[in-house]
Amino acid sequence: MHTQRFYTLTASCPDRAGIVARVTGFLAENGGWIFESNMHTDHEAQRYFLRIEVRADSIPFMLAEFRERFRPIAEELGMEWKITDSAVKKRVVLMVSKQEHCLYDLIGRWQSKELDIEIPCVISNHETFRGLVEWHGIPFHYVPVKADNKPAAYAEVRRIFEEVRGDVMVLARYMQIIPPDMCRDYPGQIINIHHSFLPSFVGAKPYHQAHARGVKLIGATCHYVTEALDQGPIIEQDVIRIDHSDSVEDMVRYGKDIEKAVLARGLRYHLEDRVLVHGNKTVVFR
Amino acid sequence: MHTQRFYTLTASCPDRAGIVARVTGFLAENGGWIFESNMHTDHEAQRYFLRIEVRADSIPFMLAEFRERFRPIAEELGMEWKITDSAVKKRVVLMVSKQEHCLYDLIGRWQSKELDIEIPCVISNHETFRGLVEWHGIPFHYVPVKADNKPAAYAEVRRIFEEVRGDVMVLARYMQIIPPDMCRDYPGQIINIHHSFLPSFVGAKPYHQAHARGVKLIGATCHYVTEALDQGPIIEQDVIRIDHSDSVEDMVRYGKDIEKAVLARGLRYHLEDRVLVHGNKTVVFR
Amino acid sequence: MHTQRFYTLTASCPDRAGIVARVTGFLAENGGWIFESNMHTDHEAQRYFLRIEVRADSIPFMLAEFRERFRPIAEELGMEWKITDSAVKKRVVLMVSKQEHCLYDLIGRWQSKELDIEIPCVISNHETFRGLVEWHGIPFHYVPVKADNKPAAYAEVRRIFEEVRGDVMVLARYMQIIPPDMCRDYPGQIINIHHSFLPSFVGAKPYHQAHARGVKLIGATCHYVTEALDQGPIIEQDVIRIDHSDSVEDMVRYGKDIEKAVLARGLRYHLEDRVLVHGNKTVVFR
Amino acid sequence: MHTQRFYTLTASCPDRAGIVARVTGFLAENGGWIFESNMHTDHEAQRYFLRIEVRADSIPFMLAEFRERFRPIAEELGMEWKITDSAVKKRVVLMVSKQEHCLYDLIGRWQSKELDIEIPCVISNHETFRGLVEWHGIPFHYVPVKADNKPAAYAEVRRIFEEVRGDVMVLARYMQIIPPDMCRDYPGQIINIHHSFLPSFVGAKPYHQAHARGVKLIGATCHYVTEALDQGPIIEQDVIRIDHSDSVEDMVRYGKDIEKAVLARGLRYHLEDRVLVHGNKTVVFR
């Protein structure tokens, strides 16, 4: 994270000549000093993507006015866009089950301010980590999910998420399938870590599937959750080498290291507004 | 490759106590000096795998007698086994189409003796590489494969392979599907390089499939060819990172680098008798 | 970790014919069922290395007698050797400073029993992590290290280590230089994680050094501590890709992920008696 | 490579507000349609770097006029800059010795048009590859380099390079040290592949050095040649995992695969004007 305050504009629009000139011309007229910028053209989709960080101290007006002044340009170019403020911390709700590795990892990063976020609460379908979470001063909500109470359980999850004004839900090996309506209502706001190198080994027990197929590398995938199980836009992936001597248990263990690293990287990209979704694919401005 | 001559015993059998003692006891009684050895137990399948290199100059008899003397032990232990001689070069028949990268790569390795093999011939369904192959002093056979001549074409391929006493066929991006009967008749003798990280993206145009899915890594898989397309035992795999800025053409280009590296590694493991197949999986003693 | 109990023999000796036969013959005579075995010959040093796991329930005597009976063979072969019991948990003393990532990572692995160890205490030159450590029920010792109290401080560290009967000290980003006499007295018992891909960037601020040199990958190295700073036998290393857009701070952040993964892997190899040291190099039987 | 023709502007200048707006404003006024663009600020050096590809058919004037019109802007911003035309193939002179792997690799890429370049000639201090090179229709120059003829030999190399109007010299495992004056006269025009992960193992026999140190990964580095041996700006690096069982010979073999891949990637970045040098570091716009 930069120590400097800046505004981040992310946008996509149909490709044409003059887009960057129009956007950066507007910024320059107002004294805007670009801190970092990334552009990408999807030539197949004929769509343009950009992300620009502007030093907050170089712009002579506040965020709300920045947005107001940019709006006509965005409309002219047919943009989907947003502007965020680095001084406003994102509010990340963690959802966990009984596996500890992603939870310890994310809490460690939050504790050291490596991830400069708020964690307004942790939600779990088990009581396992109440102690650890509360010791860190983070509220813990136990919301059991059973075969016969799912609608009520997820209504409660949504209620909590709204109440704490969450920006993003992170399924840190939550092990439960989010209901379709919730996926639809929070597009690009629910991030999952799947324990395989998608699209291989969708669904349950991917390490068992990988072991049975005899692959020589295993992986993990961080993706946005959509209604189609394990089919959402991929944010980040990575793999690790295994061999014939590795049992399913060894693979589970190696996999945990990849899962937590991939989730942490994917989440960071999301938090820094580096991920732009188009259709079922992502542009990730590293 | 070692400069020393040695015999390589590879074997697998049902697991029990005393296997290594029995095998290495026999070797020791005959003065056998072990150069390198690897063992593996598949605890699920309850099967034992071993590979032992013995210095040829430490054994007081020739290969044929070595095999004769070892036979009773192998039978006692219920082994599938073989003993090979490092002084006998393997005969590798390359099958190519119109893509150059694996061919240049393998010929370069052969020319420099990095791969200490014989290439008795190259077979292709196109004339493209006749000049290059023949310039290197390697016979080139043009065997066109059309919709209406497949049985005759593959009969010719088999005739050539038998005539040159080939040990292994390498499909160096051959781009044709080997007929089922040929797969059955040469188990563990036909090696393919598939341009995806299997089991993802089986079949045609895997890079297009990968691009459509938006994956963040692409890969290649070296495997034995079986009747089930792209389903045979995997020998080696690897991946390379891509991102949103990479077009299908970029992915094809990156993929070629992975394909040739993975094929070369997988082939070498096979040539050095480091690959033991059990069911649809491999033990690869690196 | 296997759920089964087993004894692990690790040994090295001058290379000759018949070593495996001698060792496994002894095991077989006593009914020993080999669970996993690895051998390696260092042809340059003419030295043989082996590691054998034997099922404890297949051997008709206890560990002490096993050692007694094996001793004559070891002497005959000129072996450095040991036999350990998987039922005896290793006692790992963590030493930390003010950085959290390796500590959270190792405590998470211990809490979930992924690492099946005892942590008899954590020693630190700062009070930072007392709360976290004690919440987990682990004793915490604050041993400040100042320019003028080093001999006393390290005397105290040694006293604690001896008192808790520690097997290994892990410098989990401890950031202090262990005095030479302590390095000498605990050979192969002090494990460090250095935040560079050694031998590049020895000493202080390796990420600053890497940034100044403009390298395209950064790494971390897990090694045994010896008197020569950052020169001890390397157990494990890994790297991650960076580019021109990464600041020193980004590199530090990426580096933490590599550091904790490399330390965890290296420590596990050590704990499972997979690391054999010879001179300044290691044999690591993965 | 894109099939479309485009002009590529690369530039660096002191950082300030309004740079992108000034440059892209100029392009937009002239109808310039941006195909791909990359920007980077080195906050430490307070320097701005950019690379923009503009569709040639969107600009109403030829390259020379494009340059003329851009010149005042570049001067205003204090830029180091150039504009290249994708229709003009770069002329790459390969320099080789007796190792084949990089030569076969690059010739294969050239033959298949994966690298869309001219190879006006190959220069070597050995006759080894005359046949292969000439068979491909590429002139081959034998320029022996002995202890007593170095000035004359390198004068000849320079004469040939000038005569064929070379753009870049590639030391494809050339194994000779380029004299300082030649390094000075062709800055950023001589590319070397060093067979270690620099800055580790500078100079001769890096794999022997790596073996002696017992590292767990080995690598290769593609860099611009400067007067300081193996100290020039790094373009690309990569590594591969090894272990205790790998001899120096194995490392040499594995290393070749990394060397050729890293050289090919680094060379491509250079050829596509993706590498901007500043001091002893590079910005590489992938």
Image (cartoon, coloured by chain):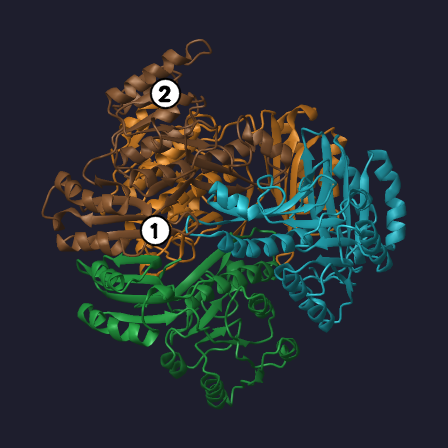
Chain colours: A orange, B green, C brown, D cyan
Amino acid at dot 2 = Phe
Q: Residues within 10 Å of mark 2 (few under 14, many from 20)?
A: many
Q: Look at mark 1 in the image and give the residue it sits on.
A: C15
Residue D273 on image: x %, y % = 73, 50
Q: Look at mark 2 in the image and give the residue it sits on.
A: C129
Which of B9 and D91 lies nearest the eye of the viewer? B9
Q: Residues within 10 Å of mark 1 (few under 14, many from 20)?
A: many
Subunit of label 1 = C
Q: Quadrant of the N terminus of chain A?
A: top right
- Name the element at disc 1: loop
Do we see residue A172 in this rendering? no
Residue C15 on image: x %, y % = 34, 51
Do we see residue D208 in this rendering? yes
- Name the element at disc 2: loop
Image point (30%, 72%), residue name: B66
Subunit of label 2 = C
Q: Choose the circle earlier in sequence order: 1 or 2.
A: 1
